[in-house]
Image (spheres, rainbow, N blue to C red):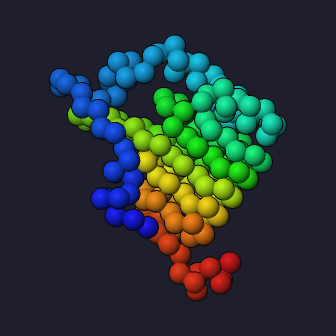
Amino acid sequence: MSDDTDGRHARVTSHPTTGPRNSLQHWPDAKSPPRVAFNYVLIWLIRVSPSLRLKNWLMRRLGITVGEGVSWGLEATPDVFWPEHITLGDHVIVGYDATLLCHEFLQAEYRVGDVVLGDRAMIGAGAIVLPGVEIGEGAQVAANSLVTEDVPPGETVAGVPARPMSSEELADD
């Protein structure tokens, strides 16, 4: 896993907001409300459709880069504001109720960054991937993990925040 100087924070763009309100109060200035409403409807359909073919087609309409053979689990959620910042490599699996976030609203700023899942990466059920994170080819994220840093190719991570699993833990599976 990488440090902040070359990790996700280096790939996230910060957008300061002004005034006493928190940055989420400024979201209509950041993204078109009709576009967010459109995204929300498509995301709702993606979350509930059992058809992987339909899910992938709808995700492409959102601007997500979708590789061949992507499997998107029921109730999994792509970012509603900036889904076009998501790239899914070939044969990626995103598990039930996982979330890929390309934005984070803070008090005085909001941040936007790409989320990239390499070929054959797997995201477990209920996991959350934060903006700017890259999941390497063949990497695995355990269920209910919070991914705050890049995951190298072939690595398995778990926990909150997600950390590499030891070889003993992997042997127990």
Q: Is residue 95 visible?
A: no
- The residue drawn where x is 80% and y is 36% is 53
Indicate the quadrant containing the N terminus: top left, top right, bottom left or bottom right: bottom left
Image position of 2 (left or right of 93):
left
Q: Is residue 154 above or below residue 22?
A: below
Q: Is residue 10 visible?
A: yes
* Depth check, front residue: 124 or 93: 93
Quarter of image, res 12: top left
Q: Is residue 23 above or below residue 138?
A: above
* Residue 153: percent from left, percent from top: 57, 66
- The residue drawn where x is 58% and y is 52% is 117
Indicate the quadrant containing the C terminus: top left, top right, bottom left or bottom right: bottom right
Image position of 80 (left or right of 131):
right
Q: Is residue 94 above or below residue 2?
A: above
**Tally of marks:** 0
- The residue drawn where x is 38% and y is 18% is 28
* Residue 151: percent from left, percent from top: 50, 63
* Residue 74: percent from left, percent from top: 71, 42
* Depth check, front residue: 114 or 18: 114
* Depth check, front residue: 66 or 168: 66
Quarter of image, res 119: bottom right
- The residue drawn where x is 63% and y is 46% is 88
* Residue 9: percent from left, percent from top: 34, 51
